[in-house]
Amino acid sequence: MTNCNTYTVQEGDTLSEIGEWFHVPWKELQRINNIENPNLIFPGQALRLSKNANVCKTYTVRDGDTLSEIGERNHVKWQRLGYYNHIANPDVIHIGQTICIPLPRGASTAEAE
Protein backbone atom coordinates (compact mmCIF):
# COMPACT_ATOMS: atom_id res chain seq x y z
CA MET A 1 0.00 0.00 0.00
CA THR A 2 1.30 3.41 -0.92
CA ASN A 3 1.31 6.07 1.79
CA CYS A 4 -0.09 9.15 0.14
CA ASN A 5 0.52 11.36 3.15
CA THR A 6 4.26 11.31 2.65
CA TYR A 7 6.32 12.38 -0.33
CA THR A 8 9.91 11.45 -1.12
CA VAL A 9 11.89 14.43 -2.37
CA GLN A 10 13.41 14.14 -5.84
CA GLU A 11 16.38 16.02 -7.32
CA GLY A 12 15.31 19.59 -8.14
CA ASP A 13 12.20 19.64 -5.92
CA THR A 14 11.37 22.69 -3.83
CA LEU A 15 8.98 22.97 -0.89
CA SER A 16 6.91 25.51 -2.82
CA GLU A 17 6.48 23.19 -5.85
CA ILE A 18 5.65 20.21 -3.66
CA GLY A 19 3.18 22.34 -1.73
CA GLU A 20 1.59 23.60 -4.93
CA TRP A 21 1.03 20.07 -6.25
CA PHE A 22 -0.45 18.76 -3.00
CA HIS A 23 -2.29 22.02 -2.14
CA VAL A 24 -0.37 22.46 1.11
CA PRO A 25 1.32 25.80 1.90
CA TRP A 26 5.09 25.41 1.83
CA LYS A 27 5.33 27.02 5.28
CA GLU A 28 3.07 24.26 6.59
CA LEU A 29 5.36 21.63 5.04
CA GLN A 30 8.31 23.37 6.65
CA ARG A 31 6.58 23.43 10.05
CA ILE A 32 5.28 19.85 10.20
CA ASN A 33 8.61 18.46 8.97
CA ASN A 34 10.73 20.61 11.33
CA ILE A 35 12.78 22.01 8.44
CA GLU A 36 14.98 24.89 9.58
CA ASN A 37 15.92 26.17 6.14
CA PRO A 38 13.13 25.77 3.56
CA ASN A 39 15.72 26.04 0.78
CA LEU A 40 17.50 22.92 2.02
CA ILE A 41 15.63 19.73 1.24
CA PHE A 42 17.37 16.66 -0.11
CA PRO A 43 16.61 13.89 -2.61
CA GLY A 44 15.38 10.85 -0.70
CA GLN A 45 14.05 12.93 2.20
CA ALA A 46 10.55 11.84 3.25
CA LEU A 47 8.17 14.72 3.88
CA ARG A 48 4.91 14.46 5.79
CA LEU A 49 2.23 16.27 3.81
CA SER A 50 -0.26 16.74 6.64
CA LYS A 51 -0.53 16.14 10.35
CA ASN A 52 -4.13 14.95 10.50
CA ALA A 53 -5.82 14.80 7.10
CA ASN A 54 -5.21 13.14 3.75
CA VAL A 55 -4.19 15.51 0.99
CA CYS A 56 -4.40 12.77 -1.65
CA LYS A 57 -6.58 9.89 -2.69
CA THR A 58 -5.27 6.61 -3.98
CA TYR A 59 -6.11 4.98 -7.26
CA THR A 60 -5.30 1.36 -8.07
CA VAL A 61 -4.38 0.80 -11.71
CA ARG A 62 -6.73 -1.51 -13.62
CA ASP A 63 -6.31 -3.39 -16.87
CA GLY A 64 -6.33 -0.95 -19.78
CA ASP A 65 -5.58 2.18 -17.72
CA THR A 66 -3.12 4.76 -18.97
CA LEU A 67 -1.56 7.56 -16.97
CA SER A 68 -3.09 10.13 -19.31
CA GLU A 69 -6.60 8.71 -18.80
CA ILE A 70 -6.15 8.59 -15.02
CA GLY A 71 -4.95 12.18 -15.08
CA GLU A 72 -7.83 13.29 -17.29
CA ARG A 73 -10.43 11.61 -15.06
CA ASN A 74 -8.93 13.36 -12.03
CA HIS A 75 -8.28 16.75 -13.64
CA VAL A 76 -4.49 16.60 -13.26
CA LYS A 77 -1.76 16.61 -15.88
CA TRP A 78 -0.42 13.13 -16.52
CA GLN A 79 3.15 14.44 -16.68
CA ARG A 80 2.96 15.76 -13.12
CA LEU A 81 1.05 12.69 -11.97
CA GLY A 82 3.92 10.54 -13.22
CA TYR A 83 6.57 12.81 -11.72
CA TYR A 84 5.08 13.05 -8.23
CA ASN A 85 4.43 9.29 -8.17
CA HIS A 86 8.04 8.56 -9.18
CA ILE A 87 6.99 6.79 -12.38
CA ALA A 88 10.12 6.61 -14.52
CA ASN A 89 8.34 5.70 -17.76
CA PRO A 90 4.81 7.14 -18.06
CA ASP A 91 4.01 4.56 -20.73
CA VAL A 92 4.54 1.75 -18.22
CA ILE A 93 2.13 1.42 -15.32
CA HIS A 94 1.11 -1.92 -13.86
CA ILE A 95 -2.20 -3.46 -12.86
CA GLY A 96 -2.47 -3.19 -9.07
CA GLN A 97 -0.04 -0.26 -8.85
CA THR A 98 -1.22 2.45 -6.45
CA ILE A 99 -1.10 6.05 -7.64
CA CYS A 100 -1.54 9.05 -5.36
CA ILE A 101 -3.74 11.80 -6.75
CA PRO A 102 -3.91 15.16 -4.99
CA LEU A 103 -7.31 16.18 -3.75
CA PRO A 104 -8.70 19.45 -5.09
CA ARG A 105 -7.50 22.55 -3.23
CA GLY A 106 -9.15 22.77 0.18
CA ALA A 107 -10.63 19.25 0.02
CA SER A 108 -8.46 17.28 2.46
CA THR A 109 -10.24 14.34 4.04
CA ALA A 110 -9.91 12.22 7.14
CA GLU A 111 -9.79 9.04 5.03
CA ALA A 112 -8.19 8.06 1.72
CA GLU A 113 -10.42 6.55 -0.95
Image: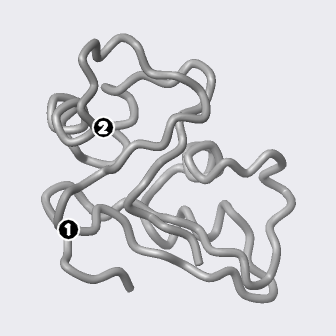
Left/right placement of residue 68 relative to residue 113 reads: right
User: Is 93 situated left or right of 100 in this image?
Assistant: right
Does 44 sit left or right of 48 as displayed? right
Q: Quadrant of the N terminus?
A: bottom right
Residue at 44% x, 68% y is: 74
Q: Name the amino acid, label 1.
A: Ala
Please tell me which residue lies in front, 29 or 61: 29
Q: Nearer the viewer, residue 29 or 102?
A: 29
Residue drawn at point x = 73 percent, y = 51 percent: 87
Reading the image, the residue beneath label 1 is 53
Viewer-proximal residue among 32 and 97: 32
Q: Position of residue 91 (x, y in %)?
A: 84, 57
Q: Is residue 64 above or below residue 13?
A: below
What count of labels does the image hold?
2
Residue 20: image location, x then y, percent:
31, 37
Residue under the image location 48 percent in, 67 percent down: 3
Give the image location of residue 80, x and y in percent. 56, 44
Residue for point 24% across, 37% down: 29
Marks 1 and 2, how far apart at CA: 15 Å
Numbered mark located on residue 86 in the image? none
In this picture, is 41 found above or below 23?
Answer: above
Residue 85: image location, x then y, percent: 60, 53
Q: Nearer the viewer, mark 1 or mark 2?
A: 1
In the picture of the structure, the residue carrying the numbered disc 2 is 19
